[in-house]
Amino acid sequence: MRSPSLVLALLLATPALASTNPPPPRPRGVPKSKASLYLPSPDGSFTCLDNSKTIPFSRVNDDYCDCPDGSDEPGTSACENGKFHCMNRGHVPGWLSSSRVGDGICDYDVCCDGSDEEWVFPGLCPDRCAEIGKAAREAEREKRRINAEGWAEREKLVAEAAQKRAEVEQKLEEARAKITAARHREALLKQNLDEILAHEATIAKRLGSGGAAAVAQKAREKIARYQNAIQSLRAAISTQRERTEILEGILDDLAKGYNPNNQDMAVKAAVVGWTELKAALVAPADNTDVSMNAAEIRDLLEEEDDLGDVIELLDMREVEEAVNLLWKIRAYLPDPVNQYLMSTYNTVKEQLQQYGIISSPASPSTSSQDSKTAAEARSAHTKASQEIRDLSAQIDRAQKDLEEDFGQDGVWRALKGVKVEVVVGEYTYELILLEKATQRSNRDSTRSNLGSFSRFETANNGGIVLVYERGAKCWNGPDRSVKVYIECGAGAGTGTGKEMEVLGVVEPEKCEYAMRVRGPVGCVKPSEREVGRKGREGTDGEGEVDESGWLVSGRDEL
């Protein structure tokens, strides 16, 4: 006999057991996360996910598109904008475009379980998720390994880029310090030049209307005085020579007839001859007019004048004639006068060169308007001004360099100028990172400019894109351009991180090229790469992958 309490408990539990019914099956093509959206309402209807309309639940997956958003046909190809969910147990869940559901093609790249064809063509696409999932996981591990190696090389690039930036900053500070000193030096040189020009202007003004003619006349007068002095000296020298010869004759006669024992006629004759000589030497024998005595000549040689200040304005031909005259008469002068004359000539010559009247072989040619002193001052000031311009340009380049976008962490600074090439068909494509891109014909070596680096962009998958624009004009088309998609890749073992490999080049639009390049710079920090991997190695097929995920379409093209 059963216990009353047991019977009572069974009676109370029976209604509950009877009311516990299994949930309705999830419509085909709906993920577990969206199952609650595909439950029939109490009145047996279904509301489109965009709330645009309500239809009987029986019309869900009836191979007829009722909802504008395609949500009523998750498991058929009726709605072009619909999405079919593949569970892919043992691999990664995927989303397939509804247009590819039930088309008789096994889309193993997205639906490795064959569920997209099973309801129309049973057995056509066997479940291959186990083997595909295993291969995908191995490939993923290899990707992580390459990414880790590439990231380590990228870190070296970042350090190199930081060092290069520090060098630019240091050069900028040095240039700023130099330009301060250069500006101060330029100001002093400018002041010196202005003072020299003002002094020379004063000299020119002092000459008045006479100008070079007045200075030339003054030089002629001085030269005439020198000529007069020279004539006087020549006459004196001639007289002295005659006097010496007579004295020598007297002395010879005295020596021949001299008797030391007594006064003889020879001594008497010598005395008489000497007396007559003194009388004869009162005037020159050749009646030469000695217009300057010794004192006057000495005063002339020691005389100072201001010709050095005004000689700069002399007429060239007049000066040369005067200098040539001084040069020719040297042959007739005694050594003391000759030495003084040469000293005067050299002084005059130096002054003529100094004031730019005659050229100096050792000096660069200067403006005919400047004296040598002014030309040297102007040259020094010009060099100082040029130094300021050079330093300013250096500062501008450094500032522009520091302001330039070199990507995240400034890593691209270390890669600027690195060249990579690839041969595709009859062309060789040459890419210089952050500078320019070129297409070269392998037949005749003609080149086409594909553009200069313009900016960075971000690809749909978060990767880096280098944009090259404003290339050569395409015939009956746009200017050539290139977009370079950067992918992660480890170097060739050199450890520099600068090894880049071009994977391919395509021309999706006329004269608009796309290039895939692989290198360490495209790698990401390993911890960041792990984000979003949840569910990708699961085996229950219920992990969620967003519809824009990397496995949505295995037919992606560059």
Image: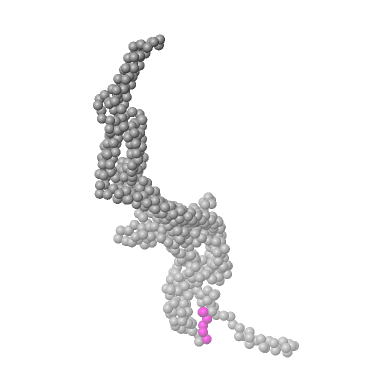
In this picture, is 180 found above or below 275?
A: below
In this picture, is 497 found above or below 125?
A: above
Whether residue 166 is visible: yes
Name the residue located 34 percent from the left edge and 11 percent from the top edge: 265
Q: Magenta part of the protein: which range? A: 37-42
Instruction: For the N terminus, give its image quadrant.
Output: bottom right
Magenta span: chief secondary structure:
loop
Q: How many marks?
A: 0
- Whether the magenta-drawn stretch holds residue 416 is answered as no
Which residue is more in the foreground, 361 or 66?
361
Name the residue located 50 percent from the left edge and 70 percent from the top edge: 546
Instruction: For the C terminus, give its image quadrant.
Output: bottom left
Whether residue 432 is visible: no
Which residue is more in the foreground, 267 or 308?
267
In this picture, is 328 found above or below 485?
A: above
Give the image location of residue 30, x and y in percent.
51, 75
